Image (tube, rainbow, N blue to C red):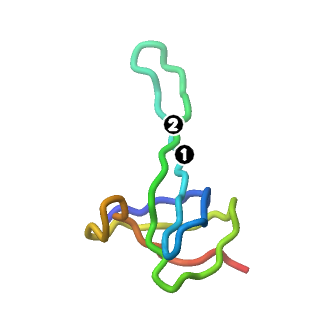
Amino acid sequence: MRHKKGQVVSTKQQKTLVVKVDNYKTHPKYKKRFKISKKFHVDNPESKAFEIGETIEIFETKPLSKLKRWTIVKPPQQ
């Protein structure tokens, strides 16, 4: 299973979070690094309250709906 860390971008949906994951890639010819961001829809089964900007860890699961294929591993440390 794949694990990723990202920041919460949206909490407007019930039982779903939108998490932005940043990744760095290197250009093959010019060798310059650049940042790529991707958004993932994450299942929040217990509807725990999250703040926008919190960092959480997610892991891949079976498809739960049309867009959701990720679930929360652990909530942020308080």
In the picture as drawn, the residue positioned furthest to the front comes out as 13
Residue 12 spot, x, y in % from top left? 60, 65
Tell me: residue 22, above or below residue 14: above
In the image, 69 versus 59, the foreground residue is: 69
Residue drawn at point x = 60 percent, y = 66 percent: 11
Label 2 sits on a secondary structure element that is strand
Q: Quadrant of residue 75?
A: bottom right
Which three-letter amino acid code belongs to the residue tagged 1?
Answer: Asp
Neighbor class of circle 1 (other Cα within 10 Å; few <14, some 14-19, many 20+) is some
Which quadrant of the figure contains the N terminus? bottom left
Which three-letter amino acid code belongs to the residue tagged 2?
Answer: Ile
Kindly identify which numbered label has been placed on residue 22: 1
> Relative to 65, is 30 on the left or the right?
right
Residue 22 spot, x, y in % from top left? 54, 45
In the picture as drawn, the residue positioned furthest to the right comes out as 78
Do labels 2 and 1 touch, CB within 8 Å?
Answer: yes
Kindly identify which numbered label has been placed on residue 36: 2
Neighbor class of circle 2 (other Cα within 10 Å; few <14, some 14-19, many 20+) is few
